[in-house]
Image (cartoon, rainbow, N blue to C red):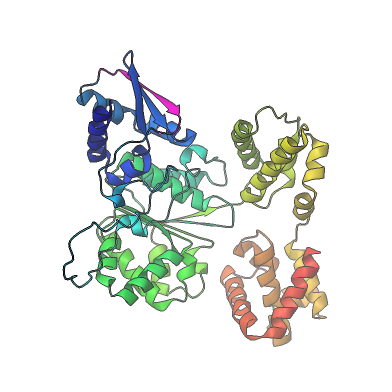
Amino acid sequence: MDDLWTGARSELEARVGTHNYVTWLAPLSLRAIDGGSADIACPTRFLSDWVSRHYARPILDALVHQGAEVERLSFTVAAPAPAVDNRPAELRPVDSIPRAVASPMPAAAPAAAPVAAPAPVRAPLRDEEMTAPLDARFTFDNFVVGKPNELAHAAARRVAEGGHVTFNPLFLYGGVGLGKTHLMHAIAYERQTRDPQARILYLSAEQFMYRFVQALRERTVMDFKELFRTVDLLMVDDVQFIAGKDSTQEEFFHTFNALVDQGKQIVISADRAPGEIKDMEERIKSRLSCGLIVDLHPTDYELRLSILQSKTEQFRQTYPGLRLGQGVLEFLAHRITSNVRVLEGALQRLFAFASLMGREIDLDMTQECLTDILRASDRKVTVEEIQRKVAEHYNIRLSDLVGPKRVRTLARPRQIAMYLAKQMTSRSLPEIGRRFGGRDHTTIMHGIRKIEELRTEDRSLAEDIDLLRRSLEA
């Protein structure tokens, strides 16, 4: 049995690639073969489900090729039996928890007779050292699609399928908790599953900057360039963080151009559209704007309810036997509108509370348990309220604040009101412009940038803004 599984493992690694093998198949073990069925032990339920959906056929073919009389597979969640692994240490799994990319551990130095040590040579950077771990929860199967995100989902699906894509890059932007990172991880998972040999790099803009600085310090810039410019799919999350970093922007620009010229796909995410990212070089903004730019809009009631229903099914497996009263999900979808993370956190708290207290989740318990979240969600600031508060604070007329006069005593409070409107409401720049006397969105953008700059230089202005914010949130 051991020899059969060892041969099958070697064949599987050659077929699916080392990265996929280490991540998904190395933790498995063959328990028994009986009646034409091979029983495969998996350390976790997630791994069992993933392998059964994506790698059952390769495993079955490998066993048959090794001479086993097997017609089907069964997967059991159990600790795998110890198996001898003669591969180098850096290719063994780090742990039994599945991750999209496992960071290799340093290989132990083999015992050898004392000899003169050669000058140390730094190994080139490798994909697995550069790629950020993916979250196994963030797949397309777990992404709830609704009107606010259907275009982003469709575009992400198209990129994940591989082949020729008519837009490059795909640029996803939106506020916190709207699904940007979820879609990025889902693209990487799907693409890796469809094409195990594809070279995929997923990392945050902060990690890109850190790796570039590290390469400069260690004089491995050519290795860095070669790695980033030979991938099939480059994914950079939160690209706004490289704004203002001149050297990093320079390298990112050249990497971007090299990949586009080769026809390789790029996926970028940010918290705002390319043209709204402060301190980003104009040539990079122009490049980012050449592809498909997709705005993930704030969730609507129907989407929030669908998300809650999906999460409830998952929580029922963790908290079996808990009863959910009628109207609870509808109540949450109506009251909590800030973002999906707050919504999921509220549902998680409800299930945990009900489990600990041994109670049914009804409307009374929901309001008792989520008092703070519901109170925060009740408070919605409007652009008009911000304008009134700013006008009162600076003792100017509201009509002057939104009017055409450009004197300094009016222009600065007006810009502060624009800045607070952008920070504290979900209104777009054109919508804010319409509420400030029909001003163009570029004027609003300029005012916001001006206040962002002055906040770091003018302590009095920063204190005024904080005072206004607290007053509006009270």
**Residue at position x 83%, y 80% from top?**
395
Q: Position of residue 277 (x, y in %)?
A: 51, 69
In depth, the one of 374 and 70 nearer the eye is 70
> Which residues are the magenta region?
69-80
Residue 32 visible from this viewpoint: yes
In the image: residue 71, left or right of residue 403: left
Q: Please identify the quarter of the rendering in which residue 154 is found.
A: top left
**Residue at position x 70%, y 40% from top?**
352
In the image: residue 217, left or right of residue 427: left
In the image: residue 71, left or right of residue 472: left
Q: Position of residue 414 (x, y in %)?
A: 70, 76
In depth, the one of 376 and 16 nearer the eye is 16
**Residue at position x 35%, y 40% from top?**
193
Q: Is residue 142 above or below residue 464?
A: above
Residue farthest toward the top in the current orientation of the protein: 35
Total of numbered circles in the picture? 0
